[in-house]
């Protein structure tokens, strides 16, 4: 089989949220807060090294802040749902902040207090404001001690404690917004999944009604007339029995074709790869060469299914009637239309002005392809002449 196809497009992956999806937003922002606190403390400590006579306590406090942030990140990576237990989280974080205060009542504490306030805002929302206010009050005491040693840059030192209030408020608002976004995203995904399931059931019901159900209904009518015919019209009974047998075989074949069609598409794989596999399998069964020209495309699931069935029916018709030696299958996207074209070099046939007239000739294959294209919002075009091969084109809005 000759294949000409572009690089497969990357398929987007979806996820379904479990019972703990509400912890996604707090866990993500808690990671950001811990990273920010560790980086800010380390940066501030490095900047202040030249401003203090003894930097040992400052570096020790910065090391404690960085290590505790790393430990918090490790805990969140292992169990992000820990944010759903705010009391132990805030208690441990508060003890660590006090420890940093004891080591260095200065810039390291200001960074730690702002980070603790932001973490509280992430975990408990606006209820963190009293805790942030306590950190701010303690921060002003620290600021007073700092200013007592030197009044330089008093405006900056006095502004540090306010950062606790701002950090708690900003973190609470950001967490609420992100949580709402996650909830809306989950609702959209769930709605799409329900709609897809409903479409799948409706499509399966339509397939069963149009194929197996009609055949079984005819078998049922023949079976009902069979007992009475056995007594009065043995010849008719024989024909009815043959009808029942033929109908049962046809129903089994239609059910098998339906199952094959349902299994033909794998939504997680690129659509052009699915079409290539269908053509390769058909080529192995028939020995007829298939040349592929496939453009990457990602149509909706119902359209994928209908196009797969159109391709299968077109190839089945070629094997039964065309006496072809070569088939070309082309998938293209042009002017916002997705087009699947199957062309053979077989014997061809005269195409009637309207495909509906094929029903009277009991040629349901092309009619079924036309109905599938129409159900997908598109149309089917058949071009053929006796001795000139046949081209079947299904054009669907992309």
Image (tube, rainbow, N blue to C red):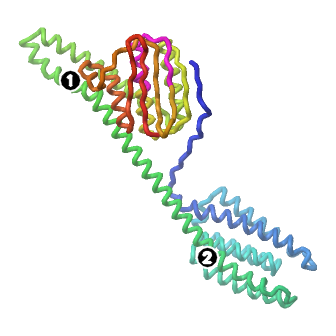
Assess disc 2: are there few (<14), some (14-19) or many (≥20) residues with their C-alpha within 10 Å of its C-alpha.
Answer: many
Q: Residue furthest top?
A: 235
Residue 380 drawn at (x, y percent): 38, 29
Residue closest to the eye, 74 or 33: 33
Question: Residue at position x 41%, y 19% from top?
Answer: 316
Question: Residue at position x 48%, y 15% from top?
Answer: 285
Q: Which residue is mark 1?
A: 218
Badge 2 marks a residue whose secondary structure is helix
In the image, taking residue 82 as reference, residue 54 lies left or right, namely: right
Residue 350 drawn at (x, y percent): 34, 16
Pointers 2 and 1 in contact (CB under 8 A)?
A: no
Q: Quadrant of residue 170?
A: bottom right
For the stretch drawn in magenta, the main secondary structure is helix
In the image, taking residue 252 as reference, residue 165 lies left or right, namely: right
The number of numbered badges drawn on the structure is: 2
Measured Cα–Cα span from mark 2 to mark 1? 72 Å
Q: Residue furthest right?
A: 53
Q: Which mark is residue 169?
A: 2
The magenta segment? 311-329
Q: Quadrant of residue 254?
A: top left
């Amino acid at each position: 089989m000759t294949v000409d196809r572009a690089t497969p497009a990357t398929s987007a992956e979806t996820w379904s949220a479990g019972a703990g999806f509400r912890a996604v937003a707090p866990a993500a922002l808690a990671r950001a807060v811990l990273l920010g606190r560790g980086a800010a403390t380390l940066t501030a400590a490095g900047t202040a090294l030249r401003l203090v006579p003894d930097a040992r306590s400052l570096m020790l406090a910065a090391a404690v802040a960085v290590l505790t942030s790393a430990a918090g990140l490790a805990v969140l990576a292992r169990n992000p749902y820990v944010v759903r237990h705010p009391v132990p989280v805030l208690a441990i974080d508060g003890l660590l902040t006090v420890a940093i205060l004891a080591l260095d009542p200065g810039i390291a504490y200001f960074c730690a207090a702002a980070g603790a306030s932001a973490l509280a805002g992430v975990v408990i929302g606006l209820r963190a404001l009293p805790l942030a206010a306590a950190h701010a009050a303690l921060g002003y005491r620290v600021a007073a001690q700092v200013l007592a040693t030197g009044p330089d840059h008093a405006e900056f030192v006095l502004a540090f404690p306010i950062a606790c209030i701002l950090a708690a408020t900003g973190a609470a608002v950001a967490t609420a917004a992100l949580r709402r976004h996650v909830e809306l995203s989950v609702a959209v995904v769930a709605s799409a999944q329900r709609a897809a399931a409903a479409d799948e059931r409706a499509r399966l019901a339509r397939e069963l009604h149009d194929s197996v159900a009609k055949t079984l209904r005819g078998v049922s009518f023949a079976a009902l007339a069979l007992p009475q015919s056995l007594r009065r019209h043995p010849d008719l009974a024989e024909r009815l029995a043959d009808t029942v047998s033929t109908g049962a075989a046809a129903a089994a074949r239609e059910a098998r074709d339906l199952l094959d069609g349902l299994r033909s598409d794998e939504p997680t794989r690129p659509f052009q790869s699915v079409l290539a596999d269908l053509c390769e399998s058909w080529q192995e069964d028939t020995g007829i060469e298939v040349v592929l020209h496939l453009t990457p495309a990602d149509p909706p699931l119902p359209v994928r299914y209908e196009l797969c069935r159109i391709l299968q029916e077109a190839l089945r018709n070629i094997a039964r009637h065309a006496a072809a030696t070569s088939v070309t299958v082309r998938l293209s996207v042009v002017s916002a239309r997705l087009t699947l074209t199957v062309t053979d070099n077989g014997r061809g046939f005269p195409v009637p002005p309207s495909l509906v007239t094929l029903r009277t000739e009991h040629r349901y294959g092309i009619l079924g392809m036309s109905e599938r294209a129409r159900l997908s919002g598109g149309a089917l075009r058949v071009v053929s002449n006796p001795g000139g091969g046949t081209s079947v084109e299904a054009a669907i809005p992309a």
